[in-house]
Amino acid sequence: MARSFFGGVHPKGYKELSSEAPIYPLHPKTVSIAMSQHIGRPCTPLVKVGDRVTIGQKIGDGQGLCVPVHASVSGTVVAVEMRPTPSGTNGMCVVIENDFRDILCPNLKKHESINELTAEELIAIIHEAGITGMGGAGFPTDVKLSSGLGKVDTVIVNGAECEPYITADDRLMRERPERILGGLRVIQKILQPERTAIGIEKNKPKAIEAIRAAADRDVEVRALRVRYPQGAEKQLIQAVTGRFVPPGGLPAAVGCAVFNVATCAAVYDAVYRGMPLVKRVLTVTGRAVTRPSNFSAPIGTLYADLIEAAGGFCCEPYKIFCGGPMMGIAQHTLDCGTIKGNNALTCYSRKDNHEVAHPHCIRCGKCLDACPMHLMPLQLHKARQKSNLEALEKGNVMDCIECGSCAYGCPAGIPLVQSFRTAKKMLRDAKAKEGKK
């Protein structure tokens, strides 16, 4: 029986815009590959202007909490410079002009079987493939696996895809279930869990059917109630196992590890095909797009090329999100290249503008009921306005998952998520300043 979790909301899904659009491969003329695509240190470029590169060739790497990045097309490096990134800031990028020859790096190594490989060897392959969490967090997958060794009794695969509009994981589960299950077998070999479950919301019946048909008997496929933010790591754990991750804690604290379906597919590609993470499935959707679609796009594909492939804009866009409208980041330019954790581009029309000119709290308490992390959004918002760092820390603002449930349910239209993102930065900056003393 699927359990529930505290809080959450039920936003209109709009998934019908793109849910029946099959995954279509893209071949862009150029790619702009960011050197920082994950939590941790950015990579240092390993190539220079004029270099010829091949698909899967390492073009960036670094020390510490860092995973490499690879060329997603074969061709010529035309720039190594600061360029716009989905975070809204400029970052170091390697720009490659596609030669459309699809030449593979000769160093790629396939593995027919994982039986003779140790957990450590598999983790090393995953690290070298540059795999990070592809559900949005961008945490290096090899680090998550290493930290879970001997601590995890339950592996959960996240197929919830609860964010409105986005259908990339849905299509991946329908069309490529063998890649997801193949990657899951690698994760099982590494962590040796007692239980493995795949959680998929009930509004994806064809995906549930496809995964069930491909899954081994030891893998539970759980049809979950439709509720946002079901796909958030801690909420999914609670829905599937009934376990509650404590404030400030990680899933391993309750014996769980969670991996997105796209991450599992990338693990399969890395181990069995020898292919690093160089492309991903993403959705281009919204009422401002002529033809909402799902694409398999090389990492670094420009947003402008994605929009063009979806038929262009059918009206003037009001707002464009990297990701979905609940957790996505509004973009100021289409010159950004996609990154590993980028699962969608959502394009709002003017009809989707629900902003309030002068938001004022009416003390209805809906934000309290909606917060899945048991936080007090209004009090945190007030503390942020007053720059009260002590109150922000005591209120556990760092536990906010930025799901947007509080803002969605706020009848006053207060931009709570932006407030909490600012509050987190204030705390991080303050701690960094203390560390320098």
Image (tube, rainbow, N blue to C red):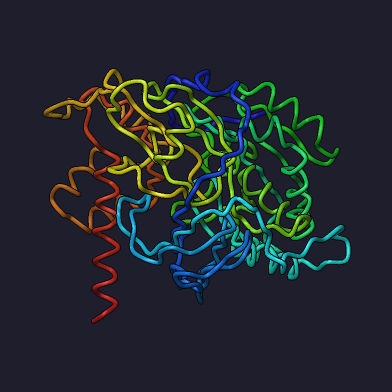
Image quarter (top left, top right, bottom left or bottom right) of the N terminus? top right
| Residue under the image location 49 percent in, 25 percent down | 292
| Residue under the image location 53 percent in, 38 percent down | 282
Question: Measured from the top left, where is residue 390 in percent x and y?
Answer: 23, 58
Task: Give the quarter of the image for residue 248.
Answer: bottom left
- The answer to whether 154 is drawn above or below residue 349 in the figure is below
Do we see residue 15 in this rendering?
Answer: yes
Question: Measured from the top left, where is residue 372 in percent x and y?
Answer: 43, 37
Query: Is 10 or 135 nearer to us in this picture?
Result: 135
Do we see residue 374 in this rendering?
Answer: no
Quick check: 141 left or right of 386? right
Quick check: 363 left or right of 275? left
Question: Measured from the top left, where is residue 253 in percent x and y?
Answer: 58, 57
Query: Is 170 or 200 nearer to us in this picture?
Result: 170
Query: Is 287 or 80 nearer to us in this picture?
Result: 80
Total labels drawn: 0
- The answer to whether 219 is drawn above or below residue 288 in the figure is below
- The answer to whether 294 is drawn above or below residue 400 in the figure is above
- Residue lying furthest bottom: 437
Quick check: 248 left or right of 245? left
Task: Give the quarter of the image for residue 407.
Answer: top left
| Residue under the image location 37 percent in, 26 percent down | 313
Quick check: 192 left or right of 266? right
Image quarter (top left, top right, bottom left or bottom right) of the C terminus? bottom left
Question: Measured from the top left, where is residue 214 in percent x and y?
Answer: 81, 35
Query: Is 198 or 46 nearer to us in this picture?
Result: 46
